Amino acid sequence: TWSAVPAGPPDPILGVSEAFKADKDSKKINLGVGAYRDDKGKPYVLSSVKKAEELLASSHPDKEYLPITGLPEFTKNAAKLAYGAESAPFASNSIAVTQSISGTGALRIGGAFLAKFYPHAKVIYLPVPTWGNHHSVFRDSGLEVRTYRYFDKKTVGLDFAGLKEDLQNAPEKSIVLFHACAHNPTGVDPTQEQWSELSDLVKEKQLFPFFDMAYQGFASGSTSRDAFAVRHFVSEGHQIALAQSFAKNMGLYGERVGAFSLVTESPEEKARVESQLKIVIRPMYSNPPLHGARIANAILSDGALYKEWEDEVKGMAERIISMREKLYDSLTDTLKTPGEWGHIKSQIGMFSFTGLQPEQCKALAEKAHIYMTADGRISMAGLNGGNIEYFAESVDKVVRG
Ligand code: PLP
Ligand code: TYF
């Protein structure tokens, strides 16, 4: 029956983890997948999460189905975290929101809802480059995917002129995807002034802004600072779509906790939109998993746990920032590695787009047991006090050729 099914290519990011696993060298480093590691290189379960789980366990909750749109307290608190309690649509109960299978599931619900109900051309613009899965998610949701310029290889920074020109030239009312903060894979974000300009441009062209916020808190260490773009657009009157993930900022990767929301005009419109979100979700997976949403909600709804969580997010962000500084200092001061490395320090979030070429990345894997994606992206969280010098020396060697 399946003789005509061709073998598909492996996921370019998760494939790096496979190669890493197969390597038996003790010096090996995995800088592929974007998952936080502590200073010992180990996966990190947040103390706020452990406490939330203990609280939950001691209350012996049942295992009944959740409603189609998930745990109501969780979705309300998730929206509050993103939009802010003082946001007008939040305060007026006009945000349609549903729980989702983490950020990916939120993007997919959003894509499917837009494919079904967006009243204009069903075209979405994605930045170049972007998280690879964006293309597949929106294509398989039934949207036409196009791209806009984002990253300038020459300056290793934002191509703001190119970005604006491409959005200017997009048909009016197109959908445009923005990474809310900590752009994956480049680590390059617009400044607050640039976001303001983008908000004006989006308004002028009547584009529909869809924010993917997979790293709230991870960029600056502050969840409210990282929500600047989302909150600014909403305060300017944009009715946005938003995909949220709690994978990174709560370390809940495999629990698959997320939310999808749409700003609507009124509580009445919100109710209509939510009724249709249910109809989109019901044949996909019926209703979402319980445990992760309970953990996230326990943290978001308890003052002391929330405070502890905020400190832990800040701790993760700060460790990543300190690794950026150490790596920059090693390359420039200690090793005098040829080239310009300022972008290592200026880039934001989980990743650094090093500028290393595919053959250099390949050489690092083969000669130094260091694994990263072929585009030269490294997950900064894979670096720690024990391996950063070896990493810098290995980069120095491969750059010198
Ligand atoms: N969006 C971006 C930009 C990402 O980097 C990721 C990956 O972490 C996701 C969405 C979705 O991740 P998850 O489905 O694990 O929440
Ligand atoms: O870009 C990354 O590394 C993260 C993690 O299929 C990830 O977004 C990567 C690939 C994937 C799911 C998550």
Image (cartoon, rainbow, N blue to C red):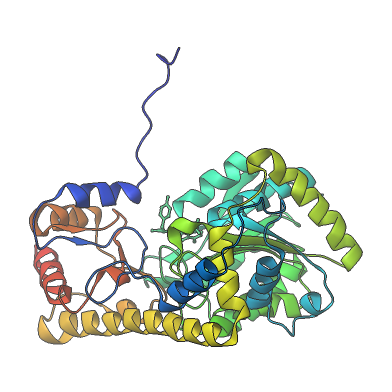
In which quadrant of the rendered image does the N terminus lie?
A: top left
**Image point (35%, 51%), residue name:** 13
Residue in view at x 55 percent, y 76 percent = 299
Question: Which residue is pictured at 48% across the width and 58% down the height?
Answer: 255
> In the image, 241: left or right of 89?
left
The x, y position of residue 246, in whole percent, is 52, 66
**Which image quadrant is residue 270 in?**
bottom right
Residue 385 against residue 117 in the figure, above or below: below
Give the number of marks.
Answer: 0
Q: Quadrant of residue 208?
A: bottom right
Q: Position of residue 297 (x, y in %)?
A: 60, 71
Give the x, y percent position of residue 158. 47, 72
State which quadrant residue 8 falls in. Answer: top left
Q: Is residue 128 shown to the viewer in this render?
A: no
**Quadrant of image for the C terminus:** bottom left
Nearest the eye: 31 or 167: 31
Q: Is residue 283 above or below residue 118?
A: above
At x 17%, y 75%, the residue is: 388
- Does 308 sit left or right of 374 as displayed? right
- Residue 21 location (% of width, % of height): 20, 50
